[in-house]
Image (cartoon, rainbow, N blue to C red):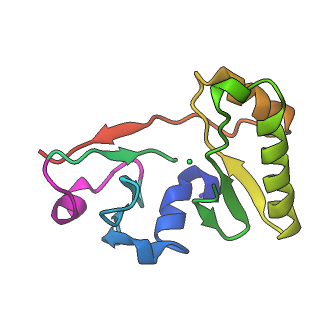
Amino acid sequence: MELLDNIFWHVFSGPQARFTVGSARAVRLAPGLSPMLAFADLRRPAFEDLVLHCAPGEPLYCADWNGERAHAPGWRERSGICTHPDHRGRGLAARLALHAVRGQLARGERPFLHVMGQNTAAVALYRRLGFASWRTCDIRVVTRA
């Protein structure tokens, strides 16, 4: 399996495991952190393993997810590159992203990121910066009944 095919499982069960609760099949970031979860097997998500770790009605985000939040050996996520609407069109996001990516490359890390497809301005920026599409994924919001 390619690392990026299930990056959040690799991140949450590896370098960031100390911030998670769950099992060998399903984990979530601990309560108080971003409400994100990951599964070892994306084809058979083990929701039942998280019942004790989720409040009824609590929304959790399930995707192959998005500063430098997620990292796995040799890879580090770029996220949260935002520009206030009053300051767009000045190249600020591009300069910020390039600065961050250069730092990652200098540390020997390959940058990756997630972007919503309908965010066409961000998609265009990332393509101009040399990012390529690996694949698309669905984002699911799940809650415990």
Quadrant housing residue 84: top right
The vertical placement of 127 against 134, above or below, is: above
Question: Image check: 128 left or right of 13?
Answer: right
User: Residue at 76% of width from left, 38% of height from top?
Assistant: 93
Instruction: Identify the residue at horizontal 52%, vertical 47% (top origin).
Output: 65
Q: Position of residue 82 (x, y in %)?
A: 65, 38
Query: Is the N terminus in the top left, top right, bottom left or bottom right quadrant?
Result: bottom right
Quarter the C terminus occupies: top left
Task: Residue 128: tell me if it is visible.
Answer: yes
Residue 48 among magenta residues: yes
Asked if the magenta segment contains residue 68, the reply would be: no
Location of residue 128 in the rendering, given as x and y in whole percent from the top left corner: 85, 31
Q: Nearer the viewer, residue 95 or 27?
A: 95
Is residue 2 visible in the rendered image? The answer is no
Q: Position of residue 53 (x, y in %)?
A: 22, 64
| Residue at the image position 65 percent from the left and 55 percent from the top | 77
Q: Residue at x 71, y 35 (%)?
A: 133
What range of the chain is rendered magenta? 42-56
**72 versus 138 height, above or below:** below
Q: Nearer the viewer, residue 59 or 73?
A: 59
Which quarter of the figure has residue 131?
Answer: top right
